[in-house]
Amino acid sequence: MKSAHLSRSFPALAAAAALLLIPQTSGAAASYDGNRWFQVEISIFSNDYPEYRDAELWSPDRLDLGYPARTREFRRLVDFLRVDDFERRVLGETEQELPETGDDVALMDQDSDLPLLETGPFARRASADLRLPDFERDAWLLLPPGLSDFQTTNTRLERSPDNRLLFTGLWRQPVLHTENASALVVRGGRQFDQHHELEGSITIRFNENEDRVVIDTNLWLIDFTLAGNGDPAWQLPPLPPGAITEAAVTDFPGRTPGIRRIVQMRQSRDMRSNEYHYLDHPALGLVISVHPYDLPPPATLEIPFESVDLEDGSQPTAAPLPLQ
């Protein structure tokens, strides 16, 4: 991190940086699952200094936007509590036979002679078994803000007139080699239809020697416009398969956005554990820290048996069962 440059260009961030510098310690040992786990925290923000952001010549021809073949979404607490979207289905002439009541009478609308809605509602897709999140062992699960070490930094960024906090997250994950690592989909800022101001992906992986954790960023900041003066030369890539979109909660309902400019941030950084790292860019800033994490083994429950003699004269023993 270039502290002099950071202090000159981003005083709000520089003032918070000193609070996050932590002495370096050794890397994580393998956990019971055979992987080395780390706790990762990241904040991504915009740099709204016109003389700094506009110093570069941004061109659609220089962009290389897209998502890797292997991506995953962050997991959120709401995902464990979400009820699947439900749809209402009207039975048409070509669909299955109408349901019948106990009196063998089809459910028909007496006024229009049209079939009523089939008994429902019906899930759009099958749901996984309901389970509660495990904040100690679930990978890529965004943890509560109260556990964050970046609270002071994020507060300063939110109060700064020259920056906007677009995304912040704290999670734990196994860190793998490049060929096995998955990119994490990132989106943040204001929402326009199915897109956000900040989109792209980050990958947390090991370097070749496994002595450094590496972050690869491929992020883009989209300058949307609602004034009808967008430039069709700026094109966004398709969203990754299975992307979670919330078009119904767009910040500008009923208005079609155009794009004035897209700025890309594509960088890689080798990181030591327990240090505060800053990735610089004319339009974006990213701060990140990684800490070794000792993954606790699954909890077990001892189920005692009553003392009874088996046929061979032995006693049954209590069997530990994993708690899921």
Image (spheres, rainbow, N blue to C red):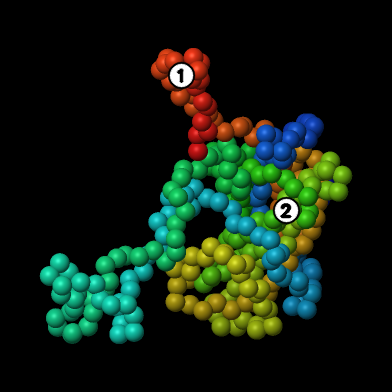
Element type at mark 1: loop
> Does the rendering let one see residue 209?
yes
How crowded pointer 1 is (Cα within 10 Å; few <14, some 14-19, many 20+) is rated as few
Q: Is residue 200 above or below residue 156?
A: below
User: Which residue sits at x=75%, y=69%?
Assistant: 54
As drawn, the label of residue 82 is none
* The one of 32 and 144 positioned closer to us in this rendering: 32
User: Which residue sits at x=40%, y=56%?
Assistant: 83
In the drawing, does residue 193 fall left or right of residue 231? left
Q: Quadrant of residue 136?
A: top right
Instruction: Please state which amino acid type lies under the numbered disc 2.
Output: Ala
Q: Residue furthest front?
A: 311
Q: Position of residue 8 (x, y in %)?
A: 78, 50
Mark 1 or mark 2, which has the lower sequence index? Answer: 2
Q: Which residue is mark 2?
A: 181
Q: Position of residue 69 (x, y in %)?
A: 70, 65
User: Which residue sits at x=59%, y=57%?
Assistant: 73
Q: Position of residue 320 (x, y in %)?
A: 52, 27
In the drawing, does residue 224 fall left or right of residue 106? right
In the drawing, does residue 140 fall left or right of residue 30? left
How far, Cα to Cα, is label 1 from label 2?
51 Å
Q: Position of residue 259 (x, y in %)?
A: 62, 77
Q: Which residue is mark 1?
A: 310
Q: Residue furthest right?
A: 209
* The one of 96 and 176 positioned closer to us in this rendering: 96
Q: Quadrant of residue 213?
A: top right
